[in-house]
Amino acid sequence: MKQRKFMVNGGVLILLVLGSILGIFTFVLGQGMDEEPNNTCETAQAVGAVELPFTLDGSLDTPPAEPDVDFFRFTGVPGEGVQVELNGIPPEQGVGDPVLGLFNSECILIAVNDDSGSLNSRLLFTIPADGVFVLAATGYPDFNFVGEGFYSGTYQLALAPAVFAGSISGRVVDAVTGTPLPGDSQPFAIVELYRCSNGDCFEFVNSQSTDSMGEFRFDSDFNGVPLLAGTYRIIAYAAQYETRQTEPFDVGEGEDVDIGDIALTPHPVVISESRACSNLPSTGGICSYRIRITNRQDTTFQGAAWSNVNASEIGSVLNFTLFPAGPPRRVSLAPQQSKNVHFAFRVPGTVQDGAFICADAFVGQGSNPFFDTVAATFLFCISKGADGEFRVVPEQEARERWQQLYGTLPYGEAPYGKAPAPAKGKE
Ligand SMILES: [Ca+2]
Ligand SMILES: [Ca+2]
Ligand SMILES: [Ca+2]
């Protein structure tokens, strides 16, 4: 068994040396080499202290024989930044879809990366306080690092010093009025940070809501690791605004970059404010509410507005319902004009306690408004409490409960619109 492993490694070595001599492979032979057995964190191959950059060549012999996963134990200066790549190379014989793991000296898994821009893996971390870190190389989908990956082949583990940036900050504003767009109330502005490499900016780094002044500041990725120096792009979106992405920009070592204002263009027609219905007694009653529609164009707007009521935990056989609050209302607005539109629906006292009843509103234009939508927003929710009364749920609580129930942001707050947001990389 041991001999077989040795032969595989020997074969890899010969292949790599031969490849280097013949110039078949464009990569440099690693300074370290995978030595079996190293299949558990506890029996990790001791690599010790190395000077970065450092590379190590290995192979996964998984399947068809017994499982293979490779653990390597390193030491370094606590707090120093390290960037590790696990690349399946050369392309023909390389591990097709590697997975990289980072463990601490107690063999507790700290971070995992499957794909980073390609099927190869990359992790960024700071060396723990005791100066010890263990890296594990395996193949997808062996996220438990027991050697049950679907891929075998050769790989190179490449460690390099990580050069950290300071921070990236800015502000999101309305392109027409210049007003800051807050993230903690309407229109719930959100910024996403992507890292660029090889001309693409698809590597998701982090996201946050802007604060009440429309401002944001990133100083780490979503794992809490400081930002790498490099090139970034920000995508900003807010309810009833067109999504916008910045041009790529550079952030140097230790640099704090303020990219200034990101101006979002409002949709041509917006539902600018709303008034929820008042609390209702346990016997039920009419929930009557209002929205304000504003035409932000320099041309007349013709269309229709409608509102849907969406309720769950109502105690019926289905336990949920969805219906329109009356017929759609015709809307005609002169340039920059605003108008109030009223809706109402009757809530029976028979719905069960705990019922969660929400209303949204849509505006569509032209003669096919249902299919030519220009504005949508979540309005409010009322809930039947233990005492049987229907009360308006505070906005933030309503949004959170909506997300729990339906698994998405409420209508109008998702990044709709024409500017496409890039897909988040599988992290
Ligand atoms: Ca191996
Ligand atoms: Ca191994
Ligand atoms: Ca992968």
Image (spheres, rainbow, N blue to C red):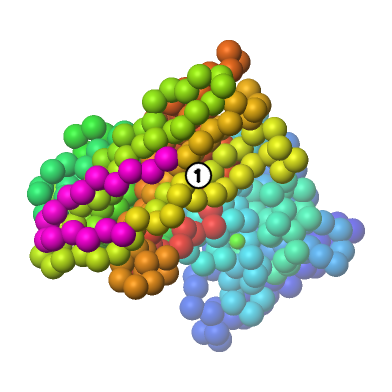
For image coordinates 10% across by 65% down, the residue present is 298
Indicate the position of residue 348 as horizontal and vertical percent values: 58, 31
For image coordinates 62% across by 56% down, the residue present is 99
For image coordinates 57% across by 66% down, the residue present is 119
Question: Is 46 placed left or right of 297 in the picture?
Answer: right
For image coordinates 73% across by 72% down, the residue present is 11
Question: Is 153 placed left or right of 279 in the picture?
Answer: right
Kind of residue indicated by mark 1: Val
Question: Which residue does the numbered mark 1 point to in the structure image?
Answer: 309
Residue 207 lies, with reference to residue 399, above or below; the image says below
Image quadrant assignment for residue 18: bottom right
Residue 422 lies, with reference to residue 274, above or below; the image says below
Image quadrant assignment for residue 155: bottom right
Residue 338 lies in the magenta stretch? yes
Residue 115 lies, with reference to residue 207, above or below; the image says below
Q: Which residues are magenta?
A: 330-344
Residue 87 lies in the magenta stretch? no
Indicate the position of residue 301 as horizontal and vertical percent values: 21, 64
In the foreground, 47 or 405: 405
Indicate the position of residue 355 as horizontal and vertical percent values: 60, 30
